[in-house]
Amino acid sequence: MNATELPAVREIVGFDEALRDRLLPACGPRSVAAARVLAVLTSRYTLAPAALAAWRLGHVSGRRRVATAGRAVVAALAAEAVAATAVKMIARRRRPPRSGRPPNDRSMPSGHTANVAATATALAAATDSDVVLAAGMLLAVVTAASRVVVNRHWASDGIAGLLLGYACAKLTAPFTVERP
């Protein structure tokens, strides 16, 4: 039996297509432009260097909390990158069709959403703040929606990315965050 023949998978595909069909017509050029900017800001190529800089600057300046936060984010992003790549290779889910570009099979999970969720969870662990976690997860949900708006992911890819990023940060936090 093919995975797409399973009733649960058919339900997810139906949900994804219905949500995309409702969301895309409601989005104008400004929404798409904002989503593209958010994609740059939530890329691991933006977040990882920022976290490395915080780690180093915190260490050099003697600000332990900043160094700890940077270290926690770097570890979470590294774990998330490995995990997301592995899941993409296993899942081989096709991206939504886009005009002018052929879809590839690297849709599940959303890496951008996983980046934000991992960063937020690592920062929350380093600062011991539920407010940081809530704000970060809200940003992760917005990121997931933005990936649907630019037609790069399905909604369930965003949900998977959020869960993956959260799990990776939770798994790495005990190794990177010192508790008194």
Image (tube, rainbow, N blue to C red):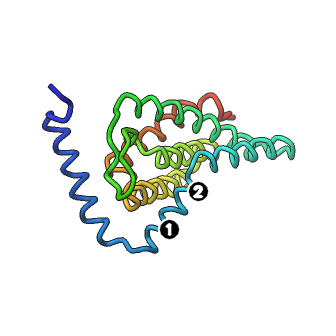
Position of 88 compared to 26: left or right? right
Q: Which of 64 and 34 is in front in this view?
A: 34
Quadrant location of the N terminus?
top left
Name, please, the residue furthest toward the top: 1
CA neighbours of label 2 inside 10 A, class few (<14), some (14 to 19), many (20+): some
Q: Indicate which disc, 2 or 1, sits on the residue closer to the N terminus.
A: 1
Identify the image quadrant of residue 29: bottom left
Q: Position of residue 162 (x, y in %)?
A: 43, 45
Q: How crowded is mark 1: few (under 14 residues within 10 Å), some or many (20 or more)?
A: few
Residue 157 higher or lower than 83, as above or below: below
Q: Of the numbered discs in the image, which one, if any, rests on residue 34?
A: 1
- Choose top left, top right, bottom left or bottom right for residue 3: top left
Query: Which of 92/80 is in front?
Result: 92
The amino acid pointed to by label 1 is Ala
Residue at the extreme right = 61
Tell me: 10 left or right of 143. Answer: left
**Can see residue 162?**
no
Q: Which residue: 34% across, 32% down?
A: 91
Does dot 1 land on a helix, a strand or a loop? helix
Q: Which residue is drawn at 31% across and 72% down?
A: 26
Q: Return the x and y of residue 21 as percentages of the image width and height.
A: 24, 62
Tell me the quadrant of the picture where the C terminus can be found.
Answer: top right
Q: Residue furthest front?
A: 100
x, y (%) of residue 12?
22, 45
Numbered badge on residue 41: 2
- Residue at image position (17%, 38%) is 8
Instruction: Determine whether 78 is above or below 128 in the image.
Output: above
Residue 74: x and y, percent? 65, 38
What's the amino acid at mark 2? Leu
